[in-house]
Amino acid sequence: MARTQETQTAAKTPGFIAYHVVKKDDKGIWHKVGASWLHQDGNGMTLQLESCPIGGRIVLRAPRDEQPAA
């Protein structure tokens, strides 16, 4: 199946950003740990983690339009 330029660009943009969230002093501290991309057929997603947290939780959030510079 041939992919259009628009589809290729959309596929490179993650559907969600993965954050490791740990509780500290009644606040959550969020660390970006990866991203996920929706499958083309819409029946799943691929999660790619740059690190694998041991404790806490992983939260997937839609990316913001403007990401702050890292």
Image (spheres, grey):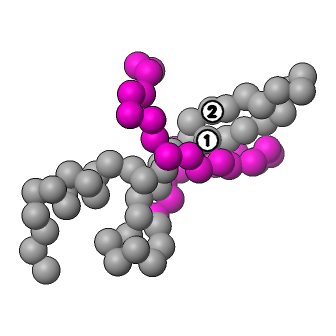
* Quadrant housing the N terminus: bottom left
How crowded pointer 1 is (Cα within 10 Å; few <14, some 14-19, many 20+) is rated as many
Label 2 sits on a secondary structure element that is: strand
What main secondary structure does the magenta stretch of the protein show? loop
Circle 2 Cα neighbour tier, 10 Å, few/some/many (<14 / 14–19 / ≥20): some
**In which image quadrant can residue 53 be found?**
top right
Is 54 or 36 nearer to us in this picture? 36
Q: Is residue 56 magenta?
A: yes
- Callout 2 touching callout 1 (CB < 8 Å): yes
Amino acid type of the residue tagged 2 in the rendering: His
Residue 3 position by quadrant: bottom left
Residue stretch rendered in magenta on the structure:
46-70
At a point 45% along the width and 78% down the height, the residue shown is 43
Q: Which mark is residue 19?
A: 1
- Horizontal placement of 29 versus 46: left or right? right
Is any part of residue 34 visible from this angle? Answer: no
Rendering coords of residue 34 (x, y %): 51, 45
Above-or-below relation of 58 to 32: below
**Which label belongs to residue 31?**
2
Q: Which residue sits furthest right?
A: 25
Q: Residue at x 90, y 22 (%)?
A: 25
Q: Is residue 50 visible?
A: yes
Magenta stretch containing residue 69, yes or no? yes
Q: Looking at the picture, does residue 23 appear above or below residue 61? A: above
Task: Answer above or below: position of 12 versus 64.
Answer: below
| Residue 19 relative to residue 28: left or right | left
**What residue is drawn where x is 63% and y is 32%?**
31
Q: Secondary structure at mark 1?
A: strand
Amino acid type, mark 1: Tyr
Q: Is residue 66 left or right of residue 21?
A: left
Distance CA(mark 2)–CA(mark 1): 5 Å
Q: Position of residue 8 (x, y in %)?
A: 19, 58
